[in-house]
Image (cartoon, rainbow, N blue to C red):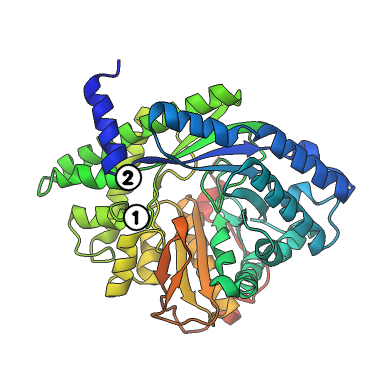
Amino acid sequence: MINIFEVNETNKMITQENLDVRTITLGISLLDCVDSDLEKLNQNIYEKITGLAQNLVATGQEIEREYGIPIVNKRISVTPIALIGGNACKTEDDFVTIAKTLDRAAKEVGVNFIGGYSALVSKGMTKSDELLIRSIPKALADTERVCSSVNVGSTKCGLNMDAVRLMGEIVVTTATLTKEHDSIGCAKLVVFCNAPDDNPFMAGAFHGVTEADAIINVGVSGPGVVKTALEQVRGESFEVLCETIKKTAFKVTRVGQLVAQEASKRMNIPFGIIDLSLAPTPAVGDSVADILCEIGLEFAGAPGTTAALAMLNDQVKKGGVMASSYVGGLSGAFIPVSEDQGMIDAVKAGALTIEKLEAMTCVCSVGLDMIAIPGDTKPSTIAGIIADEAAIGMVNQKTTAVRVIPVIGKGVGEMVEFGGLLGYAPIVPVNPYSCEAFVNRKGRIPAPIHSFKN
């Protein structure tokens, strides 16, 4: 039974502590849309998405009204388009027509993002994969709501360094084509290692080939709730600290479970997973960096940051798995720079560098996220950053990713404004020394020895 104390507690989390359901994401398989005729393929894709998702936004709004729980985003993820378009798309421009179809469908049903303009190339690239990847800059420049991701490595397969090198070039080209808007195209492009099939969070969401025809995934967030809870136990032991985080994560996940079950029932679509991620926003009081400061650090990036983040991530997961049987996606703590006011402040103060952020990604969800870098950064340097981050994921059997934004025409110390949930960020320096000879080697880095465990 839920008692009145728990109802009041949840209301306080929502009204005062920025608790929200960050997203309901409807995953849609497009495998049955495949056709050798490009026009017919685009028609099939549009009709399936608009048919299945026609009530998604309305359902989310109904649940918001009835339960008083803010649901910030309603989104769609689809099967990686490199798999869907291979039979019909003979050129990069052919793939761009699919991106435009996805964008049109997203606008029709009212979602803010649609993910899945993606390719999975952890071991090698097909002709279709390469065409899609090379089409990404134009696709992101010509659409508003399409998000793209490329998986370049895995623990089982190693790192496809040909794809890593190509993605360095693609990131720079995407930045150039969207330079009139501070290279915002790169904010909708993620490069993964060990990408999960059921991630509801953009820009990396796609509907994995292991998934059902359609599923409902929910992403929950609550950095403000965790920080407020920790304010009540200042100076207490690590045992008390961990118990507090765990109990708070449990409560937050229960809210997500309720929303997921209601959305699933009302849309008659199976429930997939709850992704409990402490995903910040630019709003004051909704920051993972502020949690780290509440734990005892002057700034995120100070000595002890990686240990504090490791503890936070682990306790969030422990609390979440007790609250739902189907926790998945990228559950843990996100550390995007532009979307977290505390991270922005830490970068401005000089406490946080891209190298420290990389170290932090060893113990948190995902990786180097929403980091603005100088617009003249070389493609080979970006490829090296991707390779470093992917290696962390490959060796540690975890998901890692890179979403960096080389802002054309701007340099270290300047500010860039993306708006909305994407926030704003100071441009951070990157290591000036070259890795060109390394990333220009052809082939792949083999899988680590523990990948052979069966």
> Does residue 204 appear to the left or right of 411 in the view shown?
right
Quick one: SS at disc 2?
A: loop
Residue 325 at least partly seen: no
Q: Residue furthest left?
A: 235
The residue drawn where x is 53% and y is 74% is 406
Q: Write down the residue under mark 2.
A: 18
The residue drawn where x is 65% and y is 49% is 116
The residue drawn where x is 49% and y is 25% is 262
Q: Write down the residue under mark 1.
A: 283
Tell me the kind of residue under disc 2. Asn
Residue 180 image point, x, y percent: 59, 74
Tell me the kind of residue under disc 1. Ala
The relative height of residue 399 versus residue 385 in the rendered view (above or below) is above
Q: How many numbered markers are drawn?
A: 2
Q: Nearer the viewer, residue 439 or 51?
A: 51
Q: Quadrant of the C terminus?
A: top right
N-terminal-most mark, 1 or 2: 2
Q: Residues within 10 Å of mark 1 (few under 14, many from 20)?
A: some
For residue 153, which quarter of the picture?
bottom right
Residue 131 at least partly seen: yes
